[in-house]
Amino acid sequence: MAEMTSHHARLYGLALALVVFFLAWAVVAAHPWATAASDPRLKTLGTREAELRHEAKLVRQVVATRWAHYRVQLKLRRVEIAKVAASNAAAAAQQSVVAAAPAAAAPVQVVNLPAHVITRTS
């Protein structure tokens, strides 16, 4: 019976040794002690990202300024359109009053022509 325990102990020991071996292998392959070397492409990408963020901020400012100017011009244009519409409505109302008034008879002028004798020659 002593042999059986020792045989099982050897198998468990071997299994444990394999687990430790593969675990150590994974740790060594991960290189946890190595410092990350800065990739020049990442540095360039970071610089480009900063430039694009700055450019986007400038574009937002320009767009906001243009929209503000547009809204002011639109407000002025709407006031102008309202004035013209009111003027047209007043003119139309005045024309309807003039058209509704009875038309006075135009004075008749009688023209008397001197008597002429028309002769025809053929």
Image (cartoon, helix red, strand yellow):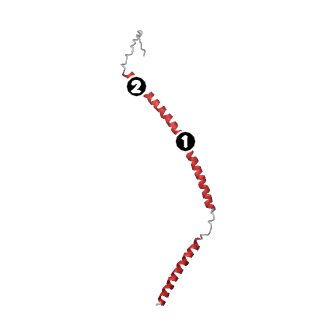
> Which is closer to the viewer, label 2 or label 1?
1
- Which of the pair 115/79 is nearer the observer? 79
Q: Is 32 situated above or below 62? A: below
First in sequence, mark 2 or 1: give its number: 1
Using a 10 Å C-alpha cutoff, classify the residue at mark 1 as few (fewer than 14 neighbours), some (14 to 19) or many (20 or more). Answer: few
* Left or right of 87 on screen, residue 52: right
Q: Is 61 situated above or below 116? A: below
Kindly report the distance in space between the C-alpha atoms of the residues bearing marks 2 and 1: 40 Å
> Image quadrant of residue 43?
bottom right
Q: Is 116 situated above or below 78? A: above
Q: Residue at x 61, y 52 (%)?
A: 51
Secondary element at tag 1? helix
Q: Residue at x 41, y 26 (%)?
A: 92
Q: Position of residue 20 (x, y in %)?
A: 54, 78
**Which residue was labeled with disc 2?**
93
Using a 10 Å C-alpha cutoff, classify the residue at mark 2 as few (fewer than 14 neighbours), some (14 to 19) or many (20 or more). Answer: few
> Image quadrant of residue 93?
top left
Secondary element at tag 2? helix
- Name of the residue lying farthest toward the top: 114
Q: Amino acid at mark 2?
A: Ala
Q: Amino acid at mark 1?
A: Arg
Labels 2 & 1 near each other (Cβ < 8 A): no
Residue 66 is labelled as 1
Residue 18 is labelled as none
- Which of the pair 5/99 is nearer the observer? 5
Q: Position of residue 85 (x, y in %)?
A: 44, 30
Q: Position of residue 69 (x, y in %)?
A: 54, 39
